[in-house]
Image (cartoon, helix red, strand yellow):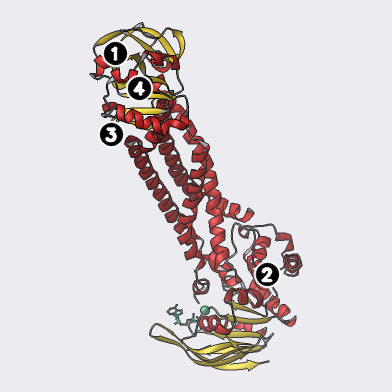
Amino acid sequence: MNIIGSALEHYYGQEHILRGIDIEIKAGSFTAIIGESGSGKTTLLSILSTLLNPTIGSVQFDGKTISELGNIDTFRRHNIGFVFQFHYLISYLTLRENVALAALDENLINPLLAELGIDSLAKRYSDEVSGGERQRAAIARALINRPKVVFADEPTGNLDSKNALGVYELFKRFSAEGTGFVVASHDKKLAEYADTIIEMEDGIVKSIYQR
Amino acid sequence: MITPLKALRKNRFKTALIFMSMTVSIAAIFLISAISGGVVSMYSAMLKTDGDIIVTQKGIADTFFSDINRSQMGSIAKIEGVKEVSALILGAAPVESLPIVGIYGVSENRFKSYTLTQGLSPKMGEVMLGSKIYETLKHPKSIFISKKKFGVSGVFKSKIGFEDGGVVINLEDGGVLFHKSASIFLITLSDLGKSDSLIKKINTLLPEGEAKTTDSFIDSYNQFKIIKTSSDVIGAMAFLMGILGIVSMMSMVVNDRKGEFGIMRSIGLSSRTIIVKLLSETLIIAVLAFAVAWGVSEGVLELIEHADKFQGYINGEIPFSLLCNVFVVSVTMALLGTLLPAIYAARIDPMSLIQRGGA
Ligand SMILES: Nc1ncnc2c1ncn2[C@@H]1O[C@H](COP(=O)(O)OP(=O)(O)O)[C@@H](O)[C@H]1O
Ligand SMILES: [Mg+2]
């Protein structure tokens, strides 16, 4: 799914945060949005992922604006996965049940858990596994419906560097299989894994680098 | 089904609070309805015993104040289609140490409607005691009603609490005690289909009296309406209290679980799914609370029924119809109480998950 943001500007109240951004996320690409804290990465990612409406400008998904997408829940369920800084696993459900909550096809759960190396933990609860394993379960939940694109905001913010690199590796692996990734992070290491690197500074795109 | 149970178990403290507040509300509704219903049904049953038609003083608000001339009994009995006429004086007076006891002065032909377990029906100056009051007073040989002494001639058993805890005397003795001729006539008919024309005849014969079928008397009896209205009002307040309890607890639950509902929205689960999820959680609690409240209420009613203090006059029961009504009320309570918090939960913006991330 091609995502195009045109003339995006965003205000929080009086504060002008995004100050004119034109951007294209190519279908299946692994895009990193990097930049200092406060540069507007999260705001941009939220706008590109349907969670936030820009104050000015528009976003198109394969040529359709948000209002043309139909039911936004259905659209998200079939096309978009989310990974947040916090795992947001539901604590009273096992890892498998957390993934099942999102799954359109339950047959895909076990193979996916195996692929992510957490199949042996399927029946555990989130407080019974490590931080890295929790984030893998959250990634499984994001990937279960084979979304066209996964948005991740600071997905490694709560992980040590070893687990962080593990997460980037996973993204790269799934990206090679055709899933698009848009990942915002202030961690410069992310850039080594992405094929498109968007550098933000002060609410504008400072540079775009394609590998 | 499994998921809501897991959610309830996870949040067991708040689940327990919701459960308790619902149980208390539902039990209150059960008890007030059962007790008021019991009063009405006991008194109705008493009037319906050998009474197809009831005659009271015209325009009287309470049978206790009714006064009609007992000498009219004979002329009513002669009307064709009338099988039997009996007269009653309904009164209340202190008996021994009990401050208020139901006293029933009845015409002789009515003694047969009491099932004696020992002794004989009373002659003048004698009483027949209900088995409950007979036990409470520890098998007395004689009793004082107000300041007048009566010998005990026999004991009867009645399912009607007002009677079983009451005293039956002769109509004439009752007349002296309560300074009236008779409170009501109870009339049995040989053909119920003719009741309308008979009522007309009785009403012309007794211009100061008012005849009605016992059923329509019970339907329109003001005292019953007052009891019923008060019980409905108290029941409605218990219902509202229950709803408020659920709303406040569920709002806290939703607040605790914001992340959960936010993530559901980001996954693409619809608002309806989230609302249904929360509703099914409280519905489970409601069904449990209903069952427990039912059990507790039956227990409390049993205790009240056998407590000497109430002399058997409070005799509530929970008929099937009340059970069904209260079940519907419980479910409605849960649904109404959960709806607002659930709608709020369904509107949680997934953006809140991102913003919590900071950096
Ligand atoms: N909901 C909000 N209300 C007001 N200001 C906000 C809000 N979210 C972010 N900001 C501000 O917007 C700027 C950019 O924030 P953000 O997009 O989160 O940047 P980044 O993710 O690069 O740290 C920051 O100065 C931040 O304080
Ligand atoms: Mg950010």
Rounded to the nearest whole Å, what is the CA distance between mark 1 and mark 4?
Answer: 19 Å
Where does label 2 land, which residue? A140
Q: Residue at image x 43%, y 52%? A: B243
Residue B172's label in the rendered image is 1
Q: Residue at image x 66%, y 75%? A: A78
**Which of the chains bears the disc numbered 1?**
B
* Image coordinates for residue B138, horizontal then vertical, percent: 39, 11
Quarter-wise, where is residue B209 in the image?
top left
Q: Comparing marks 1 and 4, which lies closer to the viewer?
A: 4
The tag earlier along the polypeptide, 3 or 4, is: 3
**Which of the chains bears the disc numbered 4?**
B
**Which of the chains bears the disc numbered 3?**
B
Where does label 3 land, which residue? B61
Rounded to the nearest whole Å, what is the CA distance between mark 2 and mark 1?
Answer: 91 Å
Quarter-wise, where is residue A187 in the image?
bottom right
Q: Is mark 3 within 8 Å of ligand 1?
A: no
B210 relative to B298 in the view: left or right: left
Where does label 4 land, which residue? B76
Whether residue B316 is visible: no
Q: Amino acid at mark 3?
A: Ala
Quarter-wise, where is residue B216 in the image?
top left
* Image coordinates for residue B134, horizontal then vertical, percent: 40, 13
**Which of the chains bears the disc numbered 2?**
A
Q: Is mark 4 within 8 Å of ligand 1?
A: no
- Neighbour class for label 3 at 10 Å: few (<14), some, many (≥20)? few
The N terminus of chain A sits in image quarter: bottom right
Viewer-nearest residue: B97 or B132: B132
